[in-house]
Image (spheres, grey):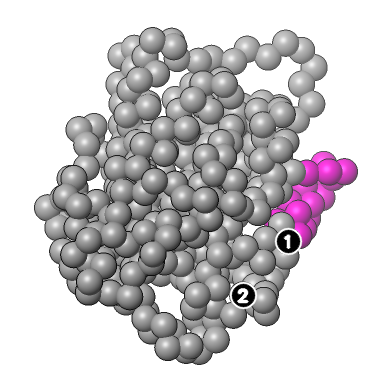
Amino acid sequence: MKQKRISDYGINIGEFPKGRLNKITDVKGVRVGHSTLRTAQYNTGVTVILPTEGNIFYEKFVAASFVHNGFGKTVGTVQIDELGILESPIALTNTLNVGKIADALVGYMAERCEKEGRPIASINPVVGECNDSKINKITDRPLDEKSFGEALENATEDFAEGSVGAGTGTQCYGLKGGIGSASRVVSICGKDYTLGILVQSNYGRTADLILDGKPIGKELDKKVNGTECDQGSIMVIVATDAPLTARQLKRVIRRCSVGIARCGSYIGHGSGEVFIGFSTANIIPANPDGILNISSIPENKIDLLFRACGEATEEAILNSMVTAETVKAGNGVVLRSLAEFI
């Protein structure tokens, strides 16, 4: 069954055209898969973003990360910032399962490289997280290598959003959060490029929520058991086929904060806003023998990607909320869907 997304309610964010699916997978080669665990005790899962159909360790991508507020436990961003490259898939999960999923990601890449006859001695696994403890018994850490493998097997272009994978147990502005995505197409120097966003939304004070420029949060706060503080976290993954240096890419992904702010957040003390981006335009070999030639857009054209990033982030957040179904957890907590109030 086709999920009803925010544009299906007549709410269209921004001015740039959208990609074919209006998802991060509109960037060629990118796929997304989920593993979802939903029981009386657990509402959690794993989401995996595969940047390419090839082996990302041998053919790395230019990458960048940015921490807007650092209340988080992400793995792998230190090396991304130092080297400006991505060499593994990106996994998202809950806060206390980061270590186990990172271990599973290392195992997967080591096995794959061994099978391809080029064993590895080290790798930088990238794993992001949000705390889903409100409706998940997080200290049990029920996710494992099997969960990660299931997410890999399910990876596809037209993936589900809402209460799936790493978004199964999240909340957003006191409502049900989840996985959301959007994309934009921009024309630079006569060529079209795609920028795609995927979010794991788990942040926001209910009274602050803005929908399509309308401050609906205050009224909404009277109808639900809303959150009093802007806390939780949001992971934002940015993919693009526009040719960018790592420095330019960092400039672009910082604009994810624009989309977050346009939904009403003031980026609170207890929230972790972590952004990770990659460009598929330049391939960096694992062991280059000579000088690398990296293409990049002119700096005076980068505003287009700034705006596209802000637009797509705002829409991805709203998609994460409106596609998420109302959940009543085993502990009695109810998180209602934004779809009930539009």
Amino acid, disc 2? Ile
Q: Which residues are magenta?
A: 103-123
**Dot 2: element:** helix
Residue 71 disc label = none
Amino acid, disc 1? Gly
Q: Residue furthest right?
A: 121
Q: Is 287 positioned to the left or the right of 61 in the image? A: right
Please provide percent x and percent y for residue 150.
59, 68
Please identify the quarter of the rendering in which residue 311 is found.
Answer: top left
Q: Quadrant of the C terminus?
A: bottom left
Viewer-side residue, 30 vs 263: 263
Q: Residue tagged by mark 2?
A: 138
**Residue 341 visible (yes or no):** yes
Q: Residue tagged by mark 1?
A: 99
Of marks 1 and 2, the one in the foreground: 2
Magenta stretch: includes residue 249: no
**Residue 24 visible (yes or no):** no
Q: Are marks 1 and 2 in contact (CB under 8 Å)?
A: no
Q: Quadrant of the N terminus?
A: bottom left
Please report the residue visible at 48 percent of the width from the left and 71 percent of the height from the top.
169
Q: State the CA–CA distance, disc 1 to disc 2.
A: 13 Å
Please report the residue visible at 47 percent of the width from the left and 39 percent of the height from the top.
238
Please report the residue visible at 69 percent of the width from the left and 44 percent of the height from the top.
76
Which of the marked residues, 1 or 2, is nearer the chain's N terminus? 1
For label 1, count other residues whose C-alpha is less than 10 Å away and answer few (under 14), some (14-19) or many (20+).
some
